[in-house]
Image: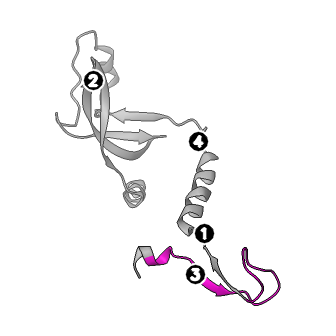
Amino acid sequence: MKAAEQRQPVKLKNLGGAEAAGGEGGAEAAYRFSDLNASRATKASANLSFILDIPLQVTVELGRTEMLVNDLLKLGQGSVIELVKLAGETLEILANQKLVAKGEVVVINDKYGVRVTEIVSPMERVEKLGK
């Protein structure tokens, strides 16, 4: 069935009781059914609005390394810390310490930012929890 056919009014006979708008008892009347997708979207946005004010810690991780306390104490201004990740690799974007996306560094008006390049699927998030 084509989309245009689905949205046309359906002719129904009023079988008594309440009369159809603009018609008499027993006459044919046009009924429009509400769009089910619109009501689902409204319910979803109502449910989502419940959590919109919850604070969330977002972290962008450039890389990690392990150091001895002795090496950490030797760090000073201008020291370089070698990270496990290579230059050009994607960054990890964490929400409350859980991986949710990956991205890349961008510079806009002399400020650093992160361009999201990939959203981690819920299935991938579950797999990461097991590791």
Is the C-beta separation of discs 2 and 3 under 8 Å?
no
Which of label 3 and label 4 is nearer to you?
Answer: 3
Where disc 1 sits, the SS reads: loop
According to the image, label 2 marks what residue?
Answer: 108
Give the distance between the C-alpha atoms of the residues marked 3 and 4, in whole angstroms.
40 Å
User: Which disc is residue 10 wearing?
Assistant: 3
Lower position in the chain sequence, tag 3 or tag 4: 3
Q: Alpha-carbon neighbours of circle 3 within 10 Å: few (<14), some, or many (≥20)? A: few
Q: Which residue is mark 1?
A: 34
Marks 2 and 3, the one that precedes in the sequence:
3
Give residue 101's position: percent from left, percent from top.
36, 45
x and y percentages locating residue 55 in the rendered image: 57, 35
What segment carries the magenta color?
5-26
The residue lying at 55 percent from left, 58 percent from top is: 41
Name the residue located 73 percent from the left edge and 78 percent from the top edge.
20
Report crowding for label 4: few under 14, some 14 to 19, many 20 or more residues within 10 A (C-alpha). few
Q: Nearer the viewer, residue 34 or 108?
A: 34
Q: Earlier in the sequence, mark 1 or mark 3?
A: 3
Q: Give whichever of 78, 33 is nearer the camera.
A: 33
Type of amino acid under label 4 = Leu
Of labels 4 and 1, the one closer to you: 1
**Marks 2 and 1, how far apart in space?**
46 Å
Question: Is residue 20 found left or right of 130 in the rendered image?
Answer: right
Reading the image, the residue beneath label 4 is 52
Q: Amino acid at mark 2?
A: Ile
Which of the colour schemes (rainbow, by chain, secondary structure, one colour) is used? one colour
Q: Residues within 10 Å of mark 2 (few under 14, many from 20)?
A: few
Q: How many marks?
A: 4
Alpha carbons under labels 1 and 3: distance apart: 12 Å
* Above or below for 33 versus 50: below
Give the image location of residue 18, x and y in percent.
81, 80
